[in-house]
Amino acid sequence: MLVDGAAVDTPAATTREGRTVKTLRGLLRLLHFVGLAMFLGGILGHIALEQLPGAEADAATIVVLLSAQVHSTRVLMMPGLFLLIVTGVWLTVRYHGGFLRVRWLTVHQVLAVLILLNTALILGPIGTHMLEVALALRPDAFDLSALHELARQELTFGPINLILTIAAIGVAVFRPAFAQRARPIHK
């Protein structure tokens, strides 16, 4: 409210602003959870596709399954991870005073960066390369050795991503205090 050209806080104005801030924070948190659901959905979809019986029966089946995995990476995992990062940064800056200020949040952010690097630099390219190798398979020369080598790499870095994700969720849910500076004991 303006009185003689100066802003004056009224209980009604403070309440409206408080509700707006609370609503924005709630929306950001909701979008953060949507990003998490997309990312985890992509991971669980990959696991389910890899467990299908007959997944290596023929070249066409392999191509279809790997196409589904690459597609889920592109439409679920990467956009979900992007949404997680953007909303996480926004929440950190807006509501936690920036980076490196809250210990549990700093650990959560470090885990998020590791997940991002593992997904974007290792797992994404491995999945795309696996699809390229599968597309080159011929029914008359059905050699899966190159595909198996890439699958071993994916089976190394995929679980690492899942463990990092579960750890990041655990840190966000339980918000542990972690080591604090030792305080002198007064006698």
Image (cartoon, grey):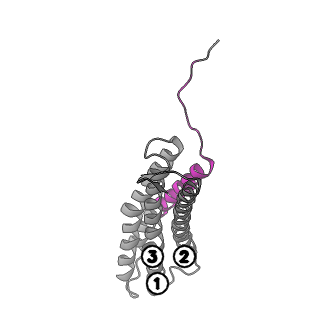
Q: Which residue of the protein is positioned furthest toward the top in this rendering?
A: 187
Q: Secondary structure at mark 2?
A: helix
Q: Secondary structure at mark 1?
A: helix
Q: Quadrant of residue 66?
A: bottom left
Q: Earlier in the sequence, mark 2 or mark 3?
A: 2
Q: CA distance from mark 2 to mark 3?
A: 16 Å
The amino acid beneath tag 1 is Val
Which residue, given by chain and number where applicable, does mark 1 sit on?
64
The amino acid beneath tag 2 is Leu
Which residue is located at x 56 percent, y 22 percent? 183
Residue 126, how many percent across, how many down?
Answer: 39, 67
Which mark is on residue 75? 3
Disc 3 vs disc 1: Cβ atoms closer than 8 Å? Answer: no
Q: Is residue 166 magenta?
A: yes
Which residue is located at x 42 percent, y 59 percent? 116
Which residue is located at x 56 percent, y 56 percent? 18
The amino acid beneath tag 3 is Val
Report the mark closest to the observer, 3 or 1. 3
* Nearer to me, 46 or 139: 46
54, above or below 73, in the image: below
Q: Is residue 131 magenta?
A: no
171, above or below 181, in the image: below
Disc 2 vs disc 1: Cβ atoms closer than 8 Å? Answer: no
Which residue, given by chain and number where applicable, does mark 2 sit on?
49
Q: Earlier in the sequence, mark 2 or mark 1?
A: 2
User: Bounds of the magenta span?
Assistant: 155-184
Residue 55, how many percent across, how many down?
Answer: 53, 79
Residue 65, how many percent across, how many down?
Answer: 48, 80
Which residue is located at x 58 percent, y 73 percent? 48
